Image (cartoon, rainbow, N blue to C red):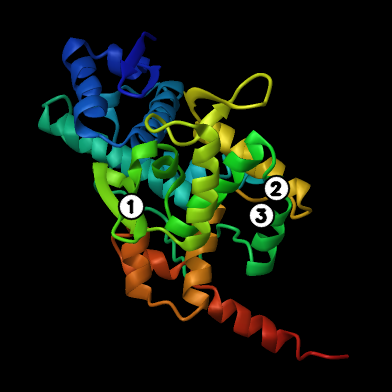
Amino acid sequence: MSELAVPQTSFLLPAAITDMGDAATRAFIDFFTAQIRNKNTRAAYGRNVSRFLAWIDEHQVVLPMVEPHHVALYIEDLGRPVEEGGQGAAIATVKQHLAAIRVLGDFLVVRQILPRNPATEVRGPKHVVRTGRTPVLTGAEARELFASIDPSTAIGLRDRALLAAMVYTFGRISAVLALDVGDYYQVGRGMRVRLQEKGGRDHEMPVHHTLVEHLDTYIEALGEVEGPLFRTINRRRTGYTANRLDRREALAMVKRRTKAAGLGGKFSNHTFRGTGITAYLSNDGQLERAQYMAGHASPRTTKLYDRREQEATLDEVERIIL
């Protein structure tokens, strides 16, 4: 395999592609560089497609000879429990694999690399989701977490501001970490923040007074008027570097902070986006407004964060007194 370098990610060119010659290789590269612009989708599709191509290579099937039943067998094997000899992938993961194979297949047909797309006729598993799986914090837990952070330290100021930014803007971690100091600005008597969400779309949000307090204190300590907003800590842990914090470092911080607060380590970066949306809806916020603030394309996605029915059900269960 030779290495393919594409914008913001890299992975190996599969032998199943390179063995087909220059035209297939160029089409494969074009698909991941020109067709897919979101870096997270590009990385996920790259992993999924590479995994499928490795599977057909293991089964000694060349790509032009792949039939719908080959794709169906792969999808079935991917989702079958490990104890039954499968790979034990979740339904959502299986559907994402099929989507990646299908989209790439369509592109290779257009480029006349494949005569037809073998994934078109393959149906994925049913996946009905009514409530999101992202663990969220209750209001009390969120308050405990923020209270556990020492704001007298450089890292404490940054972590408190970052967690608050995710909660009060409903921003995805990638959008929050992409913020520059200049993306937090005053309009009239209030403050606003400019997030860059999926598809490169700018999304402006008014800033909650609690977030204003945390950001103002942090930016004063940062002492910068431009450059990345959320930065790494210097070696002496007394201040900040010029380097932007990345999502893996943010995740490590979330795990560390939630464990230290006695909340366990099951939470992720996405927890805080979910916590903000859930708190808003639980306090009689409107679903349509939440959809806009979260940048969701569909209200069904926003509805996944509405845990009010779960709370009502728990109240009823607690009536079982023995």
Inter-mark Cα distance, 3 to 2: 6 Å
Q: Position of residue 18 (x, y in %)?
A: 29, 12
Query: Label 2 is placed on what type of residue?
Result: Ile
Q: Position of residue 100 (x, y in %)?
A: 33, 39
Which residue does the numbered mark 2 point to in the structure image? 149
Q: Nearer the viewer, residue 233 or 319?
A: 233
Query: Label 1 is placed on what type of residue?
Result: Gln
Kindly state the secondary structure of the residue where label 3 is placed. helix
Query: Label 3 is placed on what type of residue?
Result: Phe
Q: Is residue 173 above or below residue 114?
A: below
Disc 3 to disc 2: CB gap under 8 Å: yes
- Label drawn at residue 186: 1
Instruction: Residue at 54%, 50% (x, y): give it.
Output: 214
Q: Residues within 10 Å of mark 2 (few under 14, many from 20)?
A: some
Residue 257 appears in the picture as rendered: yes
Image quarter in which the N terminus is found: top left
Disc 1 to disc 3: CB gap under 8 Å: no
Q: Residues within 10 Å of mark 1 (few under 14, many from 20)?
A: few
Q: Nearer the viewer, residue 143 or 246?
A: 143
Kindly state the secondary structure of the residue where label 2 is placed. loop
Q: Is residue 209 above or below residue 319?
A: above
